Image (spheres, rainbow, N blue to C red):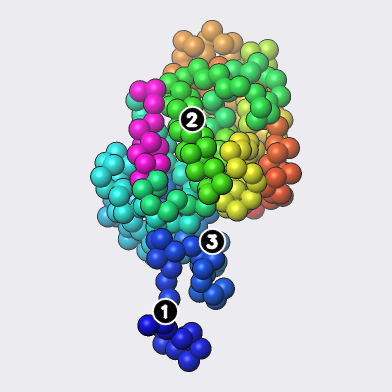
Amino acid sequence: MFLSLGSHAANHRIVPSNQTPLGALPARFRRERVLIVGCGDVGQRVALPLLRRARVLALTSTPHNQVALRQRGIIPLAGDLDDPASLRRLAGLATRVLHLAPPPGEGTGDPRTHALLTALSRRTVPRSLVYGSTSGVYGDCRGEWVSESRPVAPFTRRAFRRVDAEDAVRHWGRRWAGVARALIVRIPGIYAPDRPGGTPRDRLLRGTAVLRPQDDVFTNHIHADDLARACDLALWRTCPQRVVQVCDDTDLRMGDYYDLAADLYQLPRPPRIPRQAAEDTLPLMLLSFMSESRRLDNTRMRRELRLRLRYPTVREGLAPP
């Protein structure tokens, strides 16, 4: 028995099933379902504009987050990337997926991404999958300009875990070629005045040292709002099996970045020290960022995602309102 859409449209809500492509329904009943995995600060910045044109779902493992997501109009889905059995309900659920969840803090692989991709493969796969990786996969490039064609050369365990996740996403994309598009977004340092710990202010107030000019490294940045817009665009644009670097136009060494921030905040500039002194006094995590120097080329971001940056450099992004 068939349902007439004419006289009954006002009384019946038609929802596409997990197995039914949206194109099989009349245009007014089509609505994308976007799943965000790792819906923290950036994920929520992506979600809010999306709510106007799609159902937005978010995977979360804590009840507290479920309440906060609902308040923002996002549909929470209980699940834990460290518990593959809890991900079964994700099969066939979303038409597009944004994966921003980090790997575990140990090891050289990312079982979380493998578990997610296995769950997404059980039924109708999403049309697009965007994975948020890190520019750290390139390792130390000695200040050279870096494009997406440069081979990865991870140095830290953190970067090795990201490379494992990228390889898994690529394999998934090849498996579902012609059905789904897989895209890897490589992300540098994220900042924003309204992001927790999102500016250099606290570090400047602590007086943490930076490297002297002859020892310093180039660093790359992206404002959280511009990153969110790039992730949104990536769900709908560019080619399958693609890597895109998302960064602004800033071309500064790390010490110059902190000097600029200090001047903007009217704080003292940080002390400059030799690399040997830094190795003796600074935390290992901070030293790891001071050991890699590269400048990311954002040409592909501009041409393929067609993203126009709201904050072209950190000067605009950090400037007080």
| Label 2 or label 1, whichever comes before in sequence order | 1
Q: Amino acid at mark 2?
A: Asp
Spatial CA distance of label 2 from label 3 is 28 Å
Q: Position of residue 89 (x, y in %)?
A: 31, 54
Please provide percent x and percent y for residue 161.
43, 27
User: In the rendered view, would you say 175 is above or below 20?
Assistant: above
Q: Nearer the viewer, mark 2 or mark 3?
A: 2
Q: In the rendered view, does 107 fall on the left or right side of 232?
A: left
Q: Which residue is mark 1?
A: 13
Closer to the camera, 320 or 242? 242
10 Å crowding of disc 2: few (<14), some (14-19), many (20+): few
- Identified at 39% across, 31% down, the residue is 110
The CA distance from mark 1 to mark 3 is: 21 Å
Find the residue positioned furthest to the top: 276
Instruction: Tell me the SS state at disc 1.
Output: loop
Q: Is residue 115 magenta?
A: yes
Give the x, y percent position of residue 199: 55, 39
Tag 2 residue: 167
- Whichever of callouts 2 and 3 sits on the residue coming sooner in the sequence is 3
Can residue 52 be seen?
Answer: yes
In the image, which disc is placed on residue 50?
3
Q: What element does badge 2 sit on?
A: helix
Task: Please say whether residue 240 is one of the residues in the magenta stretch.
Answer: no
